[in-house]
Image: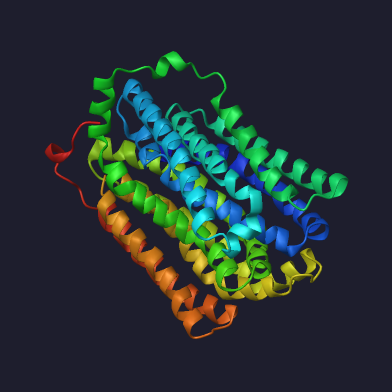
Amino acid sequence: MGSKSYSKFLSQLLVLLRGNTVAQIIPIIITPIITRIYSIEAIGALAVFVSLSSIIAALSPAGLEQAVVLANSNRRANRVVLIAGMSVLLFLLISLALITLFKFLIPANKLLIELDVFVWLIPVASALLASTNILNQYHLRHTELKKISNGVILKFTSLGIIQIGLGILARIETGLIWGRISSNIAQFLYVSRKLRLKDFRSSRKEMFATLKRFRKFPIFTVWGTFANISAIYIVSVLIANFYSIKEAGEFALMQRVLVIPIFFIGQAFGQIYYKSLVAERHTTGSGQKSYRNAIVLLSISGMIIFIPLYLFGIEFIDVFLGGRVEDISIYVKILTPMFFIRYIANPLSMTLNAFERQELNMIWQGALFASILAVFYVSNRLNYELTQLLGIYSVVVSFMYTTQIALSFKIACTKPNPQAIEPS
């Protein structure tokens, strides 16, 4: 990557980071207020709601949202958007049917009881998340980065206003969940405005041809994405199920204050890296320069973020939350090394999709998800305390993400046969 393209990469990254940074300041600022007007149990219920809706949202577009940027024509990209949207609608209906079945078969389930009527809104929240992600990829393709950034800002601004407003004025314990749903609606309406439906019209023959071209995404990518998102969000659900909703709330607070803002920085980085990698692959057949540039920037920024977090994170948490949730500082100390490795690995994992090696990504993501479930299962059988479990979890997940970094490097630096590359 030359100096000119390097500067372009950074400028595009800064546009996305502007939205993510400003948006993440709001949840951080309101967190001390949230912890004082809502119970830890309410925060735990929100964590379970967000986790389940995010996991379903990962499945909903069938992995096709990542093919929007990859398509070599705008007409084909529009058809991908349409197919992905139809998949989201289908998953909405399937999710509602499954929830109805679960409510009938296991009415005494702890999580269903905790969520109460909001369990029915999980499919709606997941559909909003998935649809917004599809449209963000559409805007990324057309380099409308400000629209993506402004949508994120609107989401978190409305989130803070509604959650605090309902908590202080109405004293509604479920205000956290209502705020999340409302903010998802606001973001979706913003990124979908000014879209012309006629641009997405297509014949059945063209739709089938497009789906056939990108068949690897629903066959392989969707399961890798599902496992990746599940590995991030399933932890709160498992803690609520095996331990308590209160401890799930404490873990969620740690994610809210520290992990999620950092995750959004990595997500913005990954979006720009993916676009740069696809362009380099189409030009040279390789992605070596984009990869090396990305891993250097990720490593430097990661050290700037995580070294102070490890050294001073406990003091920061205690002061910020007034010592109300003292277990959070312990979680930070245990998990910071793992968060650092994951911060580097997540954006680089886009390499496998850019080179259409979705089967490798699916295998790795499946192994990660299975490893996390195994850690919780074994720890529960051995009656481990939560801190003991998180220590094992940190080591296992760190190893898995280190493996992913090595795998991404090998794929990026292997120049494929140009004749083997199917046109997009």
As drawn, which residue projects farthest toward the right? 169
Res 239 seen here: yes
Left or right: where does residue 223 sit relative to residue 263? left
Residue 401, relative to residue 415: is it above or below?
A: below
Q: Quadrant of the C terminus?
A: top left
Left or right: where does residue 175 sit relative to residue 198? right
Q: Where on the picture, by quarter, is residue 82?
A: top left
Residue in the image at 54% along x and 57% along y: 301
Residue 154 at x, y percent in the picture: 67, 35
Res 269 seen here: no
Residue in the image at 77% along x and 51% along y: 30
Residue 66 at x, y percent in the picture: 38, 39
Residue 22 at x, y percent in the picture: 67, 43
Asked whether 375 or 313 is in front, the reply is: 375
Q: Where on the picture, by quarter, is residue 386?
A: bottom right
Asked whether 317 or 79 is in front, the reply is: 79
Q: Quadrant of the N terminus?
A: top left
Residue 190, relative to residue 218: is it above or below?
A: above
Left or right: where does residue 67 sit relative to residue 249? left
Protein image colouring: rainbow
Residue in the image at 37% along x and 48% along y: 350
Total of numbered circles in the picture? 0
As drawn, which residue projects farthest toward the bottom? 382
Q: Where on the picture, by quarter, is residue 150?
A: top right
Residue in the image at 40% along x and 29% along y: 81
Asked whether 410 or 191 is in front, the reply is: 191
Residue 261 at x, y percent in the picture: 61, 53
As drawn, which residue projects farthest toward the top? 198
